[in-house]
Image: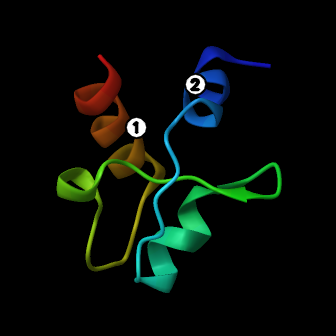
Amino acid sequence: MDNRWVLVRKARVFAPEDQGIRDVLMGAGKILALSEPDALSSGPFDVSDVEHGIQETFG
């Protein structure tokens, strides 16, 4: 398992309204998202967008 996946798995769970971000952040049967201010609100979404937000949120 690579480090990126471990970091994503430890992200705090929120429930973004946008289905696109739900699809990007779906993993291991759980919906993972960034903190409310960092959550993306429109698509299309890319994995690099998610990684960038997680780095800002969790260092």
In the displayed structure, would residue 4 be above or below residue 22?
Answer: above
- Given the image, on which type of amino acid does mark 2 rest? Arg
Marks 2 and 1 sit apart, C-alpha to C-alpha, by 8 Å
Q: Which residue is mark 2?
A: 4
Q: Residue at x 23, y 30 (%)?
A: 56
Residue closest to the eye, 18 or 14: 14
Say whether residue 44 is left or right of residue 12: left
- Given the image, on which type of amino acid does mark 1 rest? Glu
The picture quadrant where one finds residue 54 is top left
Quarter of the picture holding the N terminus: top right
Crowd rating for badge 1 (residues with CA inside 10 Å; few <14, some 14–19, many 20+): some
| Helix, strand or loop status at disc 1 | helix
Q: Are marks 2 and 1 in contact (CB under 8 Å)?
A: yes
Give coordinates of residue 42: x percent, y percent. Answer: 27, 79
Q: Which residue is mark 1?
A: 51
Q: Residue at x 65, y 29 (%)?
A: 5
The picture quadrant where one finds residue 40 is bottom left
Q: Residue at x 52, y 51 (%)?
A: 13
* Precedes in sequence: disc 2 or disc 1: 2
In the displayed structure, would residue 32 be above or below residue 19?
Answer: above
In the displayed structure, would residue 7 be above or below residue 44?
Answer: above
Crowd rating for badge 2 (residues with CA inside 10 Å; few <14, some 14–19, many 20+): few
Give coordinates of residue 33: x percent, y percent. Answer: 46, 54
